[in-house]
Image (tube, helix red, strand yellow):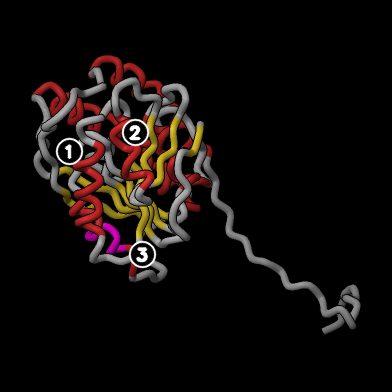
Amino acid sequence: MSVLSEGRPPVRLSVVVPVFNEADNVLPLLEEIERALTPVGAFEVVYVDDGSSDDTLARLAPVVAAGRLRLVRHLNRSGQSAAVRTGVKAARGEWIATLDGDGQNDPADIPNLFALVAKGGPDAPVLVGGLRKKRKDTLSKRLASKFANAVRQSFLQDGCTDSGCGLKLFRRDAFLDLPFFGAMHRFLPALFRAHGHPVAYVPVNHRPRERGVSKYNNWRRGLIGVVDLLGVYWLKRRTALSASVETAAAPADRKAEPAVAGEP
């Protein structure tokens, strides 16, 4: 991994976008992110290039030089979950919004997700997941996703009907505390809930792919997904949460004395 641009000072919100061979999408998507979030306040955008072999890096070079974007590069293709984690580790924001790099997620939805967490409070969600209202994908993708979500929900019961939506917003430290594995991005709601974090869901827009080609195969994803599902189910059952409280030290000028049986 190499960092091609350091950028801005710490901000509250970082947008992390994993990309692989999306040369035609990276600049239009960046412009949409900037339009959507400029009214919200200070933010940063972190692209993670997952070993692209097309012109992705060349297209991004001018905006990186202009300071509009931070770019992290995987020297070898490592997968979407690894790219998301790399971006989160590089991000400076307390909160992370993730988007797919194909342009199908709508950046205009991010402020709605951020509004749920920005107000704070004990019941505020630590993760907000997008639920695509009308999938703009092929019939085979929609059917495969519907089946996979039904199977996953029967095992994990995390209340999420669209775990594969790339548009999510979560707290950085909570994400980095989760166990990492190769397809964790598809199971974030279940993982956050298993670790005791409040989770919420928001309907979001979904758009047809206008440029480039999909990198996913339904059958391959399905076979890998079964193994991952069983692994997450095992993790969920084995995750035990313990309440804890920090104990204050005894004052320096007074030694703690052992209690005497029967003494009030």
Label 3 close to label 1 by CB (< 8 Å): no
N-terminal-most mark, 3 or 1: 1
Question: What kind of residue is marked 2?
Answer: Phe
- Image x and y of residue 236, in percent: 46, 39
256 and 114: which one is in front?
114
Which residue is identified by label 1? 104
Q: Nearer the viewer, residue 38 or 264?
A: 38
| Mark 2 nearby-residue class (10 Å; few <14, some 14–19, many ≥20) | some
Tell which tag, 3 or 1, sits nearer the viewer. 1
Instruction: Please say whether residue 170 is one of the residues in the magenta stretch.
Output: no
Locate residue 3, reporting x and y percent: 49, 38
Query: Which residue is labeled 3 in the image?
Result: 124
Magenta-drawn stretch, dominant element (helix, strand or loop): helix
Q: Quadrant of residue 158?
A: top left
Q: Is residue 91 left or right of residue 23?
A: right
Q: Residues within 10 Å of mark 1 (few under 14, many from 20)?
A: many
| Residue 76 sits in quarter | top left
What residue is rendered at 40% in x and 25% in y? Answer: 51
The magenta segment is 111-116
Q: Nearer the viewer, mark 3 or mark 2?
A: 3
Quadrant for the C terminus, please. Answer: bottom right
- Residue 15 to residue 103: above or below: below
Q: Nearer the viewer, mark 2 or mark 1?
A: 1
Residue underneath mark 2: 155
* 178 w.r.t. 151: above or below: below
At x 88% / y 76%, what residue is drawn? 256
